[in-house]
Image (spheres, rainbow, N blue to C red):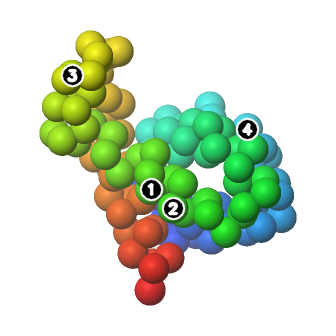
Amino acid sequence: MQASDGDLLRVLDEAEARQLPVLIAEWLPAQGARHWLAKALRVDLAFLHDHPTEVIPCLYRRCAWLGATAETTFARARAPLRGQPPAAAAELRAIVGSWIASWQA
């Protein structure tokens, strides 16, 4: 599954409408990047309910380093890694990287 600009617009719309729980419930059972985006949204759900304009920075913060060499090195230095990063980690990093670039433009 490749997340699209339509997915970005959906995330923004659902955040603004305070309907992220609906999106999370829909994407959590999915495979690939949508599953991990839903998990990241779920972590920050309470904050995003009060601050919906921060949805893209929150996703970026949660996903941009997932499985990256720097993240893995940092995690190993702090504590043993709990399993391997998801197979969709590279795709996820690319998605949130493009979304944050669009958001900052």
Judging by the rendered image, the residue that carries numbered circle 1 is 60
Q: Are marks 1 and 2 in contact (CB under 8 Å)?
A: yes
Residue 7 place in picture, x, y as percent? 58, 62
Residue 64 can be seen, yes or no: yes
- Which quarter of the picture shows residue 81? top left
Dot 1: few (<14), some (14–19), or many (≥20) neighbours within 10 Å? many
Do the CB atoms of the residues marked 1 and 4 lie less than 8 Å apart?
no
Q: Is disc 3 placed on a helix, strand or loop?
A: helix
Q: Which residue is mark 3?
A: 76
Horizontal side of residue 56 vs 20, given as left or right = left
Q: Which of 73/14 is in front?
A: 73
Three-letter code, disc 2: Pro
Give the label, 1 or 3, closer to the camera.
Answer: 3
Q: Residues within 10 Å of mark 3 (few under 14, many from 20)?
A: few
Numbered disc in front, either 4 or 2: 2
Does label 3 or label 4 sit earlier along the sequence? 4
Whether the residues at callouts 2 and 3 have beta carbons within 8 Å, the answer is no
Mark drawn on residue 35:
none
What residue is disc 2 on? Answer: 57
